[in-house]
Image: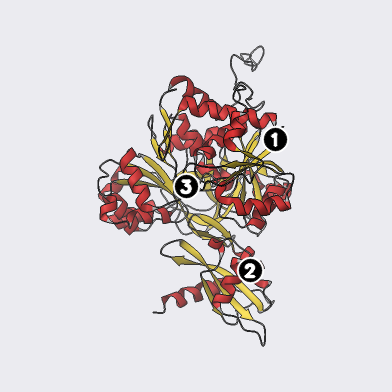
Amino acid sequence: MADFDTGLGRQAANFAALTPIDFLLRAQEVYPNRVAVIHGDLRQTWHETAERCKQLAAALRVHGISCNSTVAALLPNTPAMLEAHFGVPMAGGVLNALNIRLDVETLIYILEHGEAEVLLADSEFEEEVAQIKAALPDLYVVQVNDILGPQAALFGDVDYETFLQDALNQSDNWVLPNDEWDAIALNYTSGTTGKPKGVVYSHRGAVLSSLSMLLDWNVPLHPVYLATLPMFHCNAWCYPWSITAKVGTFVCLRRFEPNLCLQLIRDHKVTHYAAAPIVHAGLANASAEAKAGIDHVVHGTIAGAAPPAALLESMEQMGFEITHIYGLTEVYGPATICERHDDWQNLDIEARAALNARQGVRSNLVEGFTVMDPETMTEVPADGETIGELMIRGNHTMKGYLKNPQATAEAFEGGWFHSGDLGVKYPDGYIQIKDRSKDIIISGGENISSIELEDVLYKHPAVLTCAVVAVADEKWGEVPMAFVELRAGQTATPEQLTEYCLSKLARFKVPKHFVFEELPKTATGKIQKFVLRQRAKTILAVP
């Protein structure tokens, strides 16, 4: 038997820690003059982008950022947000991209929990930053005056361009990770409660998830990527890193506007974009005039809800090829793909849509994706009927939840990540979600915790009991419906509760429907949500 160990260990010649930072370095080395960023009139090459990332890293290091230091970003999809995806880890830090739609109270909680030392903040959020600074006076704020955003007087500690300029001659003051298991990003998800959980990504996981998506999507060299997907959402499913690996061009986008997106797709020959169903629907429902002139194939990925047949048909007619994927924050965004087969093209649009609506099969570089009985940890029969929990394991899975070993252990019980989603496996091996065990509402691609909404409503003086369930919505996919049982002698209107919720929650979380009636309960007093879901369907069906 041969000895394959002695003298065959790791060394500089045969091993380097995996990190997406190297994607940037290679892009600069091989294609320095190729356009990396388009933003309004701005055209920024890969050499210029890499140098700015190095300056950001150096400036952060001078400020004291090092390994495991958290740097938060409250930014739209602007060049600064792309630069943060490289500059922060090149400083040794961990990027915490904040959901810009969250209420200030939640943002403060996340910044405290993640122990952020620096906050990169767009001028659009001057009011929010003032409240954050009042609660966290030691937080160092770097203010970004984006060229397409509001130009505000300095309200942070330093302007972003000044911050970078101060490190102009320190382009070598950056680092690679000591270990590929080092943290690269911290993303918060609501989970099953109103308290967000901090999901930690590694350099290794970021690389393998990025490469996996490139393989799944068959992305060629030099794609043109429209940034419709917020970079705060699972780091835009790792696209800032994967598109860089293919030396693509990022067409930045501060906010989604269908006509603007179609114009950008037409003008810059955009080849790829990713989005929740509401974004695809916005493009499909745009005017014929807005859609005119797009004569090339555009590739899109969709996740968050099953795409309806009518939407897929509209996108096909536009020349858009849409791929359905599935994932969660805990698995770096998408970890499965509904791979299309050639013979599906022989089916009518509704039959194809039914097949494409499934969550599919494991992505490349994901070890396992299956449906299991969570009690016995055995796979359910592939009969398309037996319900079990969707589980994933492999390189796409997070390091764990920050400061929450119990939740981490529960999520990884039995050697699999427990998604909390319930579904079935079909005879062809494809998997489809049938229900959600966590009562999470997915609205416009964003997770909303029903428990968080209920906690807010319970604090209203007129509310005795309440329950929030998801209901279908043509625009958003799902929205919250609140069933409210009022206290004796108390009154409240939908408008009053809406205003109350707006004072406590981000606007997208506020229930769209309020129903006032006695809530169905079990003998032990537990609210029967399954009854309310059926009741909600009945209410919405009434003309």
**Residue 458: % across, % down:** 67, 72
User: Looking at numbered disc 2 in the image, what kind of residue is underneath it?
Assistant: Glu
| Residue found at x 56% / y 39% | 396
Q: Which mark is residue 111?
A: none
Amino acid under label 1? Asn
Query: Residue at 62% of width from left, 25% of height from top?
Result: 176
User: Relative to the observer, which residue lies in front, 394 or 318?
Assistant: 318
Q: How many C-alpha atoms fall within 10 Å of the one at disc 1: few (<14), some, or many (≥20)?
A: some
Pick whichever, 439 or 110, lies toward us.
110
Q: Secondary structure at mark 1?
A: loop
Among numbered discs 3 and 1, the one appearing first in the sequence = 1
Residue found at x 40% / y 53%: 257
**Residue 374 falls in image quadrant:** bottom right
Q: Residue furthest top?
A: 7
Q: Position of residue 154 (x, y in %)?
A: 61, 44
The secondary structure type at the circle numbered 3 is loop
Question: Percent position (x, y) of residue 358?
Answer: 42, 52
Answer with mark 2 or mark 1, whichever residue precedes in sequence: 1
The residue carrying mark 3 is 254
Q: Can you name the residue that lies furthest to the front here?
A: 153
**Residue occupying image coordinates x 45% and y 61%:** 476
Chain-order first, disc 2 or disc 3: 3
Quarter residue 67 falls in: top right
Foreground disc of the pair 2, 3:
3
Q: Is residue 415 visible?
A: yes
Residue 344: x percent and y percent?
Answer: 30, 48
